[in-house]
Image (cartoon, grey):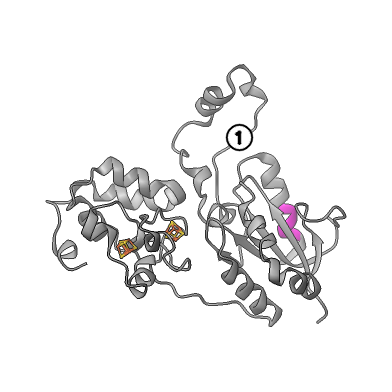
Amino acid sequence: MGKPRVGIYGLTSCAGDQLAILNCEDELIELASALDIRSWVMAQSKNDETSELEIAFVEGVIGTERDLETLQAVRDRAKVLIGIGTCAVWGGVAAMKNNLPRERMRELVYGEKAEHIDIRKALPLKAAVDVDYELPGCPVEKDQFLTLVGSLLHGDLPEFPQTPVCSECKMNENECLLVHRGEVCCGALTMAGCGARCPSLNIPCAGCHGPVEEAYYDANFRALQAHNLSKDDIIQKMGIFSSPAWMPKVLVTDDLPGKGGDYAETH
Ligand code: SF4
Ligand code: SF4
């Protein structure tokens, strides 16, 4: 196979994932020569929006009718569609207030002009189309993105470790911010991949990589409550990046008996 035809697209988002790709400065020329980039509005002025694509990378949420149309058109053209970034995978920051009626939000933000604004609930790509692979991160990690492209060029997909940020934090021999300082750290619930960047700088993890698979929500909630952290603080912090994925699980812990427990003792 020659160079795969590739499109890089952004729906409603901060465009941070496309910027993260542009920031692959040392590898950018190699990337551009290995891929036939047919469309990337952020990076080139001449774009082909009709030919079939081997690979489409899409960042952002479905937040407007136009987003939905763009996504469906890209899906129709692409053999492999990959969601990049936590917005595309989980809804991200844009989905933080999905529980508020859109009409109310439109009024609050745009006042009299609200009726002309098209804003719908912020949804991840998989809510509307089949997604072949997802790479979370806010933004995506450069190394993971390059590994993903390398695998795709070999007709494969990478398998990144499905472990929580805590595992990377422990490998960095950090003192636990939750256990030792009682801070709301979401590391145990968050997908690894960033090398525990924030706790390694003494900043609690805010969960920007989205939830790790099979997270033990109840135990984590108990561990946080054991440090006299209020439920509101915990929900607010955990809801920033992946609210739709986390909130139902957090809210079912509402009636947990007591505080603390074995997990808090042994973590
Ligand atoms: S809870 Fe936070 S500080 Fe503690 S080990 Fe996990 S990631 Fe590190
Ligand atoms: S430590 Fe948490 S908030 Fe910081 S980069 Fe990693 S996943 Fe994101």
Q: Quadrant of the N terminus?
A: bottom right
Residue situated furthest top in the rendering: 112
Answer whether residue 67 is magenta in the image.
Answer: no
> As rendered, which of 181 and 36 lies closer to the eye?
181
Residue 14 coordinates in the image, percent (x, y): 61, 46
Q: Where residue 265 appears, x then y in whole percent?
A: 15, 64
Compared across the picture, whether 188 is left or right of 122 comes to: left
- Disc 1: which residue: 119
Q: Position of residue 165 (x, y in %)?
A: 39, 66
Identify the image quadrant of residue 197: bottom left
Residue 43, compared with residue 14, is above or below; it is below
Verify whether residue 73 appears in magenta: yes
Specify the quarter for ligand 2.
bottom left
Q: Position of residue 143 (x, y in %)?
A: 58, 71
Q: In the image, which residues are magenta? A: 72-76
Give the amino acid type for the residue marked by disc 1 in the picture: Ile
Q: Is residue 158 left or right of residue 243?
A: right
Q: Crowding at label 1, few (<14), some or many (≥20) Cα neighbours within 10 Å? A: some
Which residue appears at 67% of the width and 45% of the height? Answer: 67
Count of numbered labels shown in the rendering: 1
Residue drawn at the location 61% of the way across and 68% of the way down: 145
Prevailing secondary structure of the magenta residues: helix
For label 1, the SS is loop
Quarter of the rendering occupied by the C terminus: bottom left
